[in-house]
C-alpha cells in the first residue's frame, strides 16, 4: 500500500463523512495507516472500520434523541433486512418485469452501486435517472450474495440539488491463481436472443438443444495466502491473459476432438503465477477488467530488515 | 477480499506459504470436526493450520517409485530444504507432469500436506499436488519474498493470546521459532545473491512485468515486536503418541468442498 493511495483514500473518506463528524483528513489517514500498515488490515476493511468508528462516535449522541437508522454507504450494505438511510444517485432505470413493481434500477454512491426496487403498492414519487436523492427508511435484501434495497411505504424521498460521482465497486487484489474451476476454457452459449446460458452437454436449461456459440472464459481461484477470491475472466481478458484467441482455441479443440485441451493449456499457462487483478465484485466473482502478471519483488530488503529486527 | 463469500458457502482452504524446512517439521496433524470429510490440517510450527499449501522450488529429481502402477516422486528444493511430492493415479495430471518434466525446472505446486510414519517410527511430511506447473525464475523469486513475509507474519502473531494454533504449536513443538526466522533471513539473502546474477540475463517469460509498482507484502513495518522467544524446551520432539498420523486414509480422502 503506497502512501499516495492512503492519502487518496483518506480524502475520499473525509468527503463521504457526514458533516457532523469533526475530523481532519490527516487524522483519518493516520487511522488508516495504523490499520493497514501496522495491523495489516486490508484497505477495504480499514476504510469500513474507520468510517464506522467515526460515525458511531458522532451518532451516539443523536441516538439518544431519536433512534434513527444508520446512514450507510452502498459498499457497507452487507446483510439483509436492515433498515438504513442512503444518499445516492439514480444510475440506471430498468423496465419493471411485473406490474407489482413501480420502479427498478441501479443506485450508486462513491463506494459502489446497488439494485433498488420500489413496489407499486408503496405509492412513492418516482425517481428520475441522473438525480440524487436522500432515501430514508429503505430495507436491505440479499439474493445469491448480491445485495439490494427496497423502497417501501415508509420511505421518505428527498431530492438533493447536488451531483455525486458513482464508484464502480472496483476491487484490486494480488494473489496466485491456485485453481481453475470447471466451466473454464472453451464453452458454448445458448444462441437465443437475451440468453447467454452456458450449454451443458449441448443443452440450454431454458431453450433445450441448440447449436451454441463458442466463447472463452476462465473462472480462476485467486489466493493471497490469507483468503481466496473467485475471479472471472471474460473472452477479452482471457485472450489477453493466455495469448490464445477464441479462433485458436476452437482449432485446438477441433484438432484434439476435445475441448478440455484448451483448459489444460490455459492451466499450464496461468496456475501458480502471481497476478494483480482489478474489477468489480458481483456475487461470487470479481470480474477481471484489468490484470498484470507480477515478477519478482524489486526490493526484498525491506522484508529482510523486518526479519532481522524481530 | 472475500466479501462475497457467504457464511453458508463452504469456504475454500487457503494455500499457506511455507518454506520446505518448516513444512517438513509440520508433523502434527489434526481435525476440527468429527464429520466424515472434515479437512485434516497440518500444524505449522509457526502457529497456523494448513490443509493446503503453495510452494515454489526447483524440481531436481523425479522417480517412478510405484510398483504396479505409476507413482511419481518429485524432489522440490527451496532455499531452506527439500520437500517430496508424490503423485499417483488420483493426481494423474501432476503425475504426468513429473513423468514428462526434465529436471532441473522451477515448479509451482498447490497441494495438500500429507504425513506418514516410516518403518523406523519417524513421521515424514510430504506434499500431494493438486496442481504442478512450470514457472519462471521471477515467479519463484516472488514466492520466496511472499513466503518470507507470511512466515514473519506468523512468527510475529505467535505470542498473541488469541492464537489457538500458536498455543497448539507450543505444546507440540516447543514454540521456538528462531530457526524459522533464520531461514527467512537466509532465503532472502540467497535471493539477493541470485537476482544480482540474473537481472541481466533475461528470463524466458513473455508476460512477466519488471515493474512492480508496489511491494506485494502488506506491510514492511520493521518494528521489533518484542517477541521473547525463549526456548522453553528445544527438544520437544512431538512424541508419536499424540501425533495423529492417520491423515492419509485413502487416496481420495479429505478434499474440502470445492464449491
Image: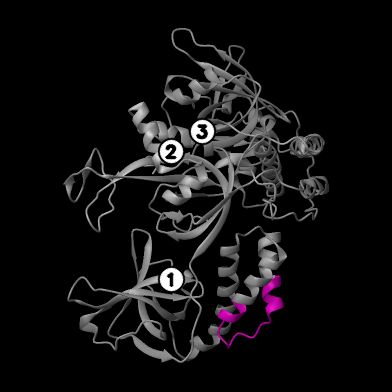
Label 1 sits on a secondary structure element that is strand
Q: What is the CA distance from the residue labelled 3 to the residue labelled 1?
A: 36 Å
Identify residue for label 1: A113
**Residue B256: numbered disc:** 2
Neighbours of disc 1 within 10 Å: few (<14), some (14-19), many (20+): many
Label 3 sits on a secondary structure element that is helix
Neighbours of disc 2 within 10 Å: few (<14), some (14-19), many (20+): some
User: Is residue B250 visible from the viewing direction of this image?
Assistant: no
In the rendered image, residue B243, in percent from the top left (x then y), is placed at 57, 27
For the C terminus of chain B, the image quarter is top left
Residue depicted at 69% across the width and 35% down the height:
B203
Relative horizontal placement of residue B113, taking residue A191 as reference (left or right):
right
Look at the picture and state if A123 lies above or below B115.
below
A23 magenta-colored: yes
Dot 3 and dot 1 within a common chain: yes
Residue depicted at 27% across the width and 85% down the height:
A153
In the rendered image, residue A42, in percent from the top left (x then y), is placed at 60, 59
State the residue in front, A62 or A294.
A294
Look at the picture and state if A90 lies above or below A245.
below
Identify residue for label 3: A268
Label 2 sits on a secondary structure element that is loop
* Quadrant position of residue B113: top right
Residue range of the region highlighted in magenta in the rendering: A13-30
Look at the picture and state if B246 lies above or below A178.
above
Amino acid at each position: 500500500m503506497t502512501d499516495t493511495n492512503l492519502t487518496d483514500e483518506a480524502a475520499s473518506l473525509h468527503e463521504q463523512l457526514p458533516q457532523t463528524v469533526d475530523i481532519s483528513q490527516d487524522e483519518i489517514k493516520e487511522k488508516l495507516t495504523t490499520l493497514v500498515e501496522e495491523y495489516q488490515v486490508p484497505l477495504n476493511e480499514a476504510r469500513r472500520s474507520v468510517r464506522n468508528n467515526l460515525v458511531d462516535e458522532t451518532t451516539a449522541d443523536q441516538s439518544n434523541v431519536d433512534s434513527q437508522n444508520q446512514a450507510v454507504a452502498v459498499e457497507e450494505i452487507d446483510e439483509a433486512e436492515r433498515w438504513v438511510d442512503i444518499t445516492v444517485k439514480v444510475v440506471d432505470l430498468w423496465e419493471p418485469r411485473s406490474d407489482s413493481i413501480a420502479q427498478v434500477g441501479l443506485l450508486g454512491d462513491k463506494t459502489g452501486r446497488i439494485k433498488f426496487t420500489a413496489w407499486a403498492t408503496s405509492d412513492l414519487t418516482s425517481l428520475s435517472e441522473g438525480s440524487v436523492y436522500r432515501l430514508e427508511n429503505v430495507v436491505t435484501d440479499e439474493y445469491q450474495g448480491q445485495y439490494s434495497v427496497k423502497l417501501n411505504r415508509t420511505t421518505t424521498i428527498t431530492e438533493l440539488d447536488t451531483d455525486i460521482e458513482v464508484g464502480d465497486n472496483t476491487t484490486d487484489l494480488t494473489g496466485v491463481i491456485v485453481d481453475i474451476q470447471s466451466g473454464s476454457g472453451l464453452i458454448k452459449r445458448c444462441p437465443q436472443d437475451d440468453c447467454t446460458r452456458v450449454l451443458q452437454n449441448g443443452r440450454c436449461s431454458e431453450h433445450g438443444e441448440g447449436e451454441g456459440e463458442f466463447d472463452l472464459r476462465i473462472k480462476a481461484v485467486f489466493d493471497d495466502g490469507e483468503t481466496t477470491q473467485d475471479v472471472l475472466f471474460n473472452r477479452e481478458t482471457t485472450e489477453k491473459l493466455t495469448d490464445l484467441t477464441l479462433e485458436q482455441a476452437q482449432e485446438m479443440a477441433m484438432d484434439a476432438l476435445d475441448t478440455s485441451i484448451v483448459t489444460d493449456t490455459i492451466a499450464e499457462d496461468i496456475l501458480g503465477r502471481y497476478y494483480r487483478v482489478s474489477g468489480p465484485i458481483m456475487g461470487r466473482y470479481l470480474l477481471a477488467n484489468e490484470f498484470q502478471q507480477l515478477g519478482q519483488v524489486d526490493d526484498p530488503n525491506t522484508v529482510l530488515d523486518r526479519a532481522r529486527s524481530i | 477480499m472475500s466479501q462475497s463469500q457467504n457464511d453458508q458457502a463452504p469456504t475454500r482452504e487457503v494455500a499457506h506459504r511455507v518454506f520446505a524446512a518448516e513444512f517438513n517439521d509440520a508433523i502434527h496433524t489434526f481435525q476440527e470436526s468429527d464429520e466424515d470429510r472434515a479437512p485434516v490440517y497440518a500444524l505449522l510450527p509457526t502457529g497456523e493450520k494448513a490443509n493446503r499449501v503453495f510452494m515454489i522450488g526447483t524440481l531436481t529429481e523425479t522417480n517412478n517409485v510405484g510398483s504396479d502402477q505409476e507413482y511419481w516422486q518429485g524432489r522440490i528444493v527451496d532455499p531452506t530444504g527439500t520437500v517430496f511430492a508424490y503423485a499417483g493415479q488420483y493426481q494423474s495430471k501432476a503425475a504426468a507432469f513429473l513423468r514428462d518434466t526434465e529436471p532441473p525446472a522451477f515448479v509451482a505446486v498447490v497441494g495438500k500436506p500429507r504425513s506418514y510414519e516410516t518403518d523406523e517410527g519417524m513421521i515424514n511430511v510430504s506434499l500431494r499436488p493438486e496442481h504442478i506447473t512450470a514457472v519462471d525464475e521471477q515467479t519463484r523469486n516472488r514466492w520466496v519474498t511472499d513466503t518470507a513475509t507470511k512466515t514473519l507474519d506468523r512468527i510475529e502473531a505467535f505470542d498473541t493470546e488469541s492464537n489457538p494454533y500458536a498455543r497448539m504449536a507450543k505444546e507440540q513443538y516447543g514454540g521456538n521459532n528462531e530457526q524459522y526466522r533464520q531461514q527467512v533471513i537466509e532465503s532472502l539473502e540467497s535471493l539477493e545473491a541470485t537476482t544480482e546474477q540474473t537481472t541481466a540475463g533475461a528470463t524466458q517469460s513473455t508476460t512477466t512485468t519488471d515493474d512492480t509498482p508496489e511491494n506485494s507484502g502488506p506491510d514492511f513495518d520493521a518494528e521489533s515486536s518484542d517477541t521473547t522467544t525463549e526456548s522453553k524446551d528445544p527438544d520437544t520432539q512431538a512424541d508419536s503418541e499424540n501425533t495423529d498420523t492417520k491423515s492419509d486414509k485413502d487416496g481420495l480422502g479429505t478434499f474440502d468442498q470445492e464449491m
